[in-house]
């Protein structure tokens, strides 16, 4: 998921922020810092991105928005520090013998941030809202394990009550699946499965923008949103785990420029910076503040497969093979990423959890530095077969990205590689984040940068997004055989069969090449060494509810 949100702001703009000082030479978290108070009453200021595109559990698709959602909402389950699902809003979950039906008892002390009890009907409404085609939720396909979800989303069933969830009473839910789903309790922890309040949402498109209507059931509640400046959250006094929460207030400082973010961190205005200028990595790499975490993610580019010349898989494959992935990770990103030789990353498990999916599936091209020339030779051959020998007659096309580290640097490198190796001209097209994601979603591009962090540790999280008509299939690609394999994998209760089907599906994806994987993601951020109790997830989310600044 997965999208670091950066656009252009001047570092000097920090001086205008009411919550941040501009004095120079402050140490992070030191004198002049706004990380105030005792551990249980501290105000933590952090940066995980700029103005979010959405903080609606149904509509958010970005990692920064997801971080905010895990603080303000909660599902039937939640993931612990090890990424394992634990009971959350659910007090008890019982699975039927055939593993197709779940009976869920809600906590008696589950409450919304305004004190009203969380009811079973809240989940029924929220899940029906997700699959309702009118909601246009990009993540609607993640509901497909639930009975009739896919048929409702496609419009084949118009009665939302046919979705496999019903309220038996105020505290009891019955959930029916289409087929056995071994990772369903992990899905329940993902934001798309969170409940929202009907009386706050219905008829109010701006419900997420106003603290009075942004009523959640999570550990924190939003109390202020200074647009393009900060989202401020405070402890939810009605949360069942209130006594375990540490900071009184979390200020998500909304900065978009890498230089401004670094300045804020150096001045002590934030204690965590989720991005930094690429040119500064070398200077910070050996410092205690510098943090990297291997994520379940892939950084890649996508081709608009409905537009010429990218409707030809030979063209797509040629551009992919001409990419020097070792150059990108050694000279551009420089934080230990592995060059990609397949779409599913090298951190995702296979059927045998002692092995990785990538290890079992193997690579689709060589990422050995010594094999780059042979990759380029194959790329030139494919491009000639497509009617563009040495790039002759190839139209000038655009590569679209949002201006952030390392997207600009990657764009410049790819454009140079395609020119020098294939003789084709690609122009860079930069768009600010909110415009960029809408443009990409609508297919109004030719080549675009992308990245995906898993929603749970299973290959299907990387593969089902490329099914025909999927809300996250921004490549506009369609392959009937691929769809059939993924559907079978989704419905199979046999682990060995599931993984065999997913390997076969990835074979098709990499042969057709609607996407060109570049490298497997490392999350990079700066963290004040005095910040304790913070943790992050391989899924990309960052957790501050148990964090504090120590002396």
Image (spheres, helix red, strand yellow):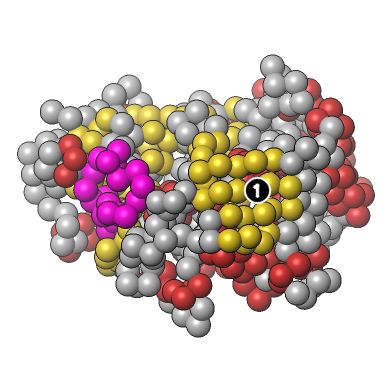
Q: Quadrant of the C terminus?
A: top left
Q: Is residue 337 above or below residue 442?
A: above
Residue ID at (46%, 60%): 118
Q: Tag count in the figure?
A: 1
Q: Position of residue 129 (x, y in %)?
A: 61, 69
Indicate left or right for 194 with 52 as reference: right
User: Furthest-front residue in view?
Assistant: 169
Quarter where residue 72 is shown:
bottom left
Q: Is residue 10 above or below residue 338?
A: below
Q: Is residue 191 visible?
A: yes
Q: Position of residue 373 (x, y in %)?
A: 75, 28
Q: Position of residue 511 (x, y in %)?
A: 85, 42
Residue ID at (81%, 59%): 468
From the image, tell me which residue sits under label 1.
103
Q: Nearer the viewer, residue 497 or 375?
A: 497
| Span highlighted in magenta in the image | 230-253
């Amino acid at each position: 998921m997965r999208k670091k949100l950066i656009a252009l702001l001047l570092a000097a703009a920090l001086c205008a922020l009411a919550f941040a000082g501009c004095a120079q030479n402050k140490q992070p978290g030191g004198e002049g810092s706004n990380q105030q108070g005792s551990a249980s009453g501290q105000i933590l200021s952090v940066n995980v991105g700029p103005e979010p595109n959405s903080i609606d559990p149904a509509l958010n698709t970005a990692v920064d928005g997801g971080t905010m959602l895990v603080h303000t909402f909660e599902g039937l389950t939640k993931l612990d520090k090890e990424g394992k699902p634990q009971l959350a809003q659910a007090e008890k979950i019982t699975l039927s013998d055939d593993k197709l039906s779940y009976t869920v008892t809600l906590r008696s002390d589950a409450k919304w941030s305004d004190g009203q009890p969380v009811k079973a009907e809240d989940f029924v409404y929220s899940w029906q809202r997700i699959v309702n085609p009118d909601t246009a939720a990009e993540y609607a396909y993640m509901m497909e394990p639930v009975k009739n979800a896919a048929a409702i989303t496609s419009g084949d069933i118009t009665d939302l009550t046919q979705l496999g969830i019903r309220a038996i009473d105020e505290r009891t839910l019955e959930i029916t699946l289409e087929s056995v789903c071994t990772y369903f309790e992990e899905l329940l922890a993902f934001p798309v499965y969170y409940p929202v309040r009907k009386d706050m949402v219905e008829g109010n498109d701006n419900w997420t923008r106003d603290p009075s209507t942004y009523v959640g059931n999570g550990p924190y509640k939003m109390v202020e949103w200074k647009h393009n400046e900060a989202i401020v959250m405070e402890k939810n006094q009605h949360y069942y785990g209130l006594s375990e929460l540490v900071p009184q207030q979390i200020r998500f400082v909304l900065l978009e420029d890498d230089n401004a973010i670094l300045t804020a961190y150096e001045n002590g205005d934030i204690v965590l910076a989720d991005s930094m200028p690429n040119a500064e990595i070398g200077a910070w790499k050996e410092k205690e503040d510098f943090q990297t975490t291997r994520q379940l993610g892939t950084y890649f580019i996508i081709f608009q497969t409905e537009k010429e010349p990218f409707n030809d898989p030979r063209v797509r494959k040629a551009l992919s093979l001409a990419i020097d992935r070792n150059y990108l990770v050694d000279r551009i990103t420089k934080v230990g990423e592995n060059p990609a030789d397949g779409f599913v990353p090298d951190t995702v498990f296979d059927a045998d959890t002692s092995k990785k999916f990538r290890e079992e599936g193997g690579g689709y091209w060589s990422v050995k530095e010594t094999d780059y020339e042979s990759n380029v030779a194959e790329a030139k051959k494919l491009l000639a077969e497509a009617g563009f020998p040495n790039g002759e007659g190839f139209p000038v096309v655009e590569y679209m990205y949002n201006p952030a580290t390392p997207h600009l640097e990657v764009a410049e490198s790819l454009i140079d590689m395609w020119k020098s190796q294939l003789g084709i001209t690609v122009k860079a097209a930069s768009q600010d984040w909110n415009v960029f994601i809408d443009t990409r979603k609508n297919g109004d591009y030719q080549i675009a940068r992308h990245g995906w962090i898993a929603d749970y540790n299973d290959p299907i999280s990387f593969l089902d997004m490329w099914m025909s008509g999927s809300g996250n299939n921004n490549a506009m690609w369609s392959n009937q055989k691929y769809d059939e394999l993924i559907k079978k994998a989704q419905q199979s209760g046999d682990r060995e069969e599931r993984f065999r089907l997913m390997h076969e599906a990835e074979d098709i994806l990499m042969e057709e090449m609607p996407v060109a994987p570049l490298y497997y993601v490392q999350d990079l951020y700066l963290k004040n060494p005095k910040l304790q109790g913070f943790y992050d997830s391989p899924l990309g989310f960052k957790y501050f509810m148990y964090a504090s600044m120590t002396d």
